[in-house]
Image (cartoon, rainbow, N blue to C red):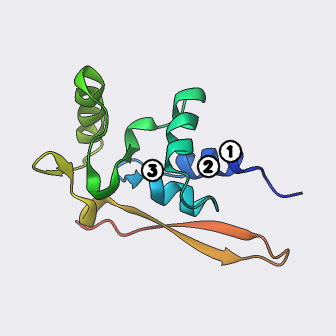
Amino acid sequence: MPEDKRARVVRCIRALPAGTVSSYGALAKAAGWPGAARQVVRILHQVPGLPWHRVVGSGGAIKLSGENAAEQKFRLRMEGVTFRGARVDMKRHEFHFVKEVSSTQYPVLRAQSRRRP
């Protein structure tokens, strides 16, 4: 039986390695739920222990406000993520999910990072 959508989103978020980021929409698409960026936000709020700071808006924008935005920036900088102005440098730190088809015909996510020195 295939995983439900929520579990796939959680698995994708947990797959983000330190020093990389992904957008809400890219995570939804990788989990097989395209167009569900708002549901990704809801899951980030509901499930404790996820690396929430590695999820940003499209184009690398920090979508949080106030102290939460400062906390997210601080955590990302501690992991070596660089910024171009107020946005994450997505060319250097964006995490790309690659879909492969397994023998059971369900997509299997394989992580691929294009991290440059």
Check disc 1 and report the residue beneath it. 6
The vertical placement of 31 against 56, above or below, is: below
Q: 79 or 31, which is in the foreground?
A: 31
Q: Residue at x 30, y 25 (%)?
A: 68
* Side of 21 where 105 appears, left or right: right
The vertical placement of 69 against 54, above or below, is: above
Check disc 2 and report the residue beneath it. 9
User: Marks 3 and 1, how far apart in space?
Assistant: 13 Å
**Could you tell me if the residues under marks 1 and 2 are in contact, i.e. CB atoms within 8 Å?**
yes
User: Which numbered disc, 3 or 2, marks the residue that appears first in the sequence?
Assistant: 2
User: Marks 3 and 2, how far apart in space?
Assistant: 10 Å
Please provide percent x and percent y for residue 19: 34, 50
Q: 78 or 57, which is in the foreground?
A: 57
Q: Secondary structure at mark 1?
A: helix
Q: Secondary structure at mark 3?
A: helix
Please provide percent x and percent y for residue 80: 25, 47
- Residue type beneath disc 2: Val
Please provide percent x and percent y for residue 30: 57, 62
Q: Secondary structure at mark 2?
A: helix
Q: Residue at x 9, y 49 (%)?
A: 85
User: Which numbered disc, 3 or 1, marks the residue that appears first in the sequence?
Assistant: 1
Q: 77 or 48, which is in the foreground?
A: 48
